[in-house]
């Protein structure tokens, strides 16, 4: 494994997310299957926020466990385009960070705390791939509920 391998994995996850959700348009921003769920825009924003959260957890000051605060921040997002911009920026920042690291740095343990303590920092990549997959799946359901057909992500 090399830092470039992890960048490839992150870029693929982002590409799959973008392709699966491309059928959603700005006019779909406020759609949610029920009023207690995130809207389409908020689902994308939450995905972006989680990229930042993992990055900060592994390479910054640790994992911020204020989930109510995180949800409040996401609930402010009303635009799918703004959420997509956030996601683009977050993935770019993370891939640039990962590319700048050596394998020695990527295998350093995540500091003690409630999330992933002691695991190699590079482990966040698999966590992000899984999390991004989960939300692209949710957004595919949103698209179907709107009468749209999400594209097959891998083609």
Image (tube, rainbow, N blue to C red):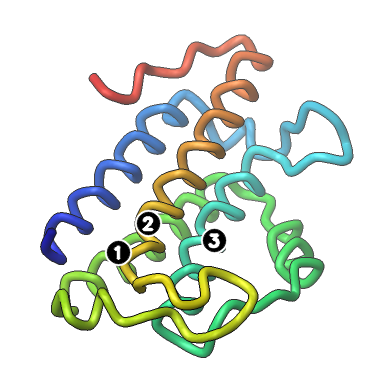
Instruction: Tell me how far mark 1 sits from mark 2, CA to CA.
Output: 6 Å
Asked if 137 appears above or below 58 in the picture, the reply is above
Instruction: Describe residue 111's horizontal placement relative to residue 59 as left or right.
Output: right
Instruction: Describe residue 151's horizontal placement relative to residue 64 as left or right.
Output: left
Residue 86 x %, y %: 47, 60
Residue toward you, 65 or 91: 65
**What kind of element bears circle 3?**
helix
Residue at 69% across, 59% down:
74
Of tags 3 and 1, the one toward the viewer is 3
Q: Residues within 10 Å of mark 3 (few under 14, many from 20)?
A: some
Residue toward you, 69 or 62: 62
Quadrant containing the C terminus is top left
Residue at 88% across, 36% down:
35
Q: Residues within 10 Å of mark 2 (few under 14, many from 20)?
A: some
Residue toward you, 137 or 1: 1
Residue 88: which numbered mark, if any?
Answer: 2
**What kind of element bears circle 1?**
helix
Q: Tell me which numbered mark, 3 or 1, is placed earlier along the sequence.
A: 3
Instruction: Tell me which corner region of the image, top left, top right, bottom left or bottom right, holds residue 96.
Output: bottom left
Residue at 26% across, 65% down:
95
Residue 50: which numbered mark, if any?
Answer: 3
The residue carrying mark 1 is 92
Residue toward you, 134 or 112: 112
Asked if 127 appears above or below 107 in the picture, the reply is above
Residue 23 x %, y %: 46, 24
The answer to whether the residues at label 1 and label 2 have Cβ atoms under 8 Å apart is yes
The answer to whether the residues at label 3 and label 1 have Cβ atoms under 8 Å apart is no
């Amino acid at each position: 494994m090399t830092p470039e391998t992890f960048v490839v994995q992150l870029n693929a996850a982002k590409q799959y997310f973008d392709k699966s959700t491309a059928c959603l348009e700005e006019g779909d921003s406020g759609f949610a299957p029920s009023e207690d769920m995130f809207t389409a825009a908020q689902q994308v924003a939450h995905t972006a926020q989680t990229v930042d959260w993992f990055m900060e957890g592994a390479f910054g000051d640790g994992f911020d466990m204020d989930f109510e605060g995180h949800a409040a921040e996401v609930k402010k997002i009303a635009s799918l385009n703004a959420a997509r911009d956030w996601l683009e920026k977050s993935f770019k920042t993370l891939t640039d960070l990962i590319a700048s690291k050596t394998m020695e740095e990527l295998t350093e343990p995540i500091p003690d705390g409630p999330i992933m303590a002691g695991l190699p920092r590079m482990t966040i990549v698999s966590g992000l791939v899984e999390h991004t997959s989960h939300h692209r799946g949710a957004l595919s359901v949103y698209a179907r509920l709107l009468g749209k057909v999400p594209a097959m992500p891998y083609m």
